[in-house]
Amino acid sequence: MKICWYDDDRLGVVQGDQIFDVTAALRVLPAPQYPAGCKAQGDLLIANLDAVRAEIERVLPQAAARPLAGAKLLCPVAQPGKIIGVPVNYADHVAEAKADAATFTTRFTGSIEEQGLFLKATSSLIGCSEPVQVHLPNRLTHHEIELGLVIGKSAKNVKAEDALSYVAGYAIALDMTVRGGEDRSMRKSVDTYSVLGPWLVTADEIADPQALDLELTVNGQPRQRSNTAKMIMYIAQQIAWASTFYTLMPGDIIMTGTCEGVGPVVPGDRIHARVEGIGEMDVDVVAAGA
């Protein structure tokens, strides 16, 4: 099932070139008890995804439809607790970073385990119908396409062999980045520098997340192209490792690392991103405040 938030916070299911308004399915959600209940549950919809999906199936035959084209697609996770990033997770990207120390700096070297995971501010998160805003025009902003995954249930100290059972679904992620010497969490948390979309594809529709083609173009020119099979640290390992440091909650997002071909974008550019089994999306780049 392809689930999205769109327009004025409507809940939708995407089928072909249509969005079906299934906002009525939200009535099965429990009323959160503030603040303790909200802290314990994570994103309310993701935490109750099974019940919501069952209600969606019930209301879908009578749901109103509209064309997908022209809909404003919002971030498919409304209230993530955290966004976790995995650094330099493709060997060819490691090589290009080492070959261009002037751009990528030499501050972060060593294995993924040595460098560690990083966190991105949730305030940086947008959907694909919103533009990436360049806030620091005198510095390089780079695109990084990644497979994004959304945690579906609380996870702590999980085993790698069980890790994928904690995934609610997958989406395309853009981990936009300001180049420089500051910590990753600062440079990657600029407003609008985390893009997730175009919708959430539930985990049952992705037979093997470790075998998906992904590609990105800018203004029609190819930039990035790879397959998730080429990851250095596989997705199940990422979840298991992250869960030893953090309790993962429903709605938490893991951006699983980018491949070679990262490059600059400037206002006026259009990014086109595609991940096999999920779909594709266009994201505009504009000057901040434009």
Image (cartoon, grey):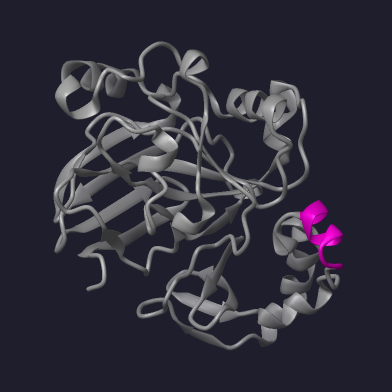
Q: Nearer the viewer, residue 18 or 234?
A: 234
Return the x and y of residue 143 as percentages of the image width and height.
27, 44
Locate residue 41 relative to residue 19 in the image: left or right: right
- Residue 155: x and y in percent read 76, 36
Q: Is residue 93 above or below residue 12?
A: above
Magenta residues span 33-41
Drawn side of residue 39 relative to residue 285, left or right: right
Q: Is residue 43 above or below residue 222?
A: below
Taking 34 as reference, is 259 left or right?
Answer: left
At 19% from the left edge and 20% from the top edge, which residue is drawn? 101
Q: Residue at x 17, y 17 (%)?
A: 99
Please tell me which residue lies in front, 176 or 162: 176
Residue 164 lies left or right of residue 29; in this view the side is: left
Q: Quadrant of residue 231?
A: top left
**272 shown above or below 65:** above
Tell me the quadrant of the picture where the N terminus can be found: bottom right
**Residue 116 is a magenta residue:** no
Of residues 96 and 200, the one nearer the viewer is 96
- Which quadrant of the rendered structure holds the C terminus? bottom left
Q: Of helix, strand and loop, which mostly describes the magenta segment? A: helix
Q: Name the residue located 64 percent from the left edge and 29 percent from the top edge.
A: 242
For residue 35: magenta? yes
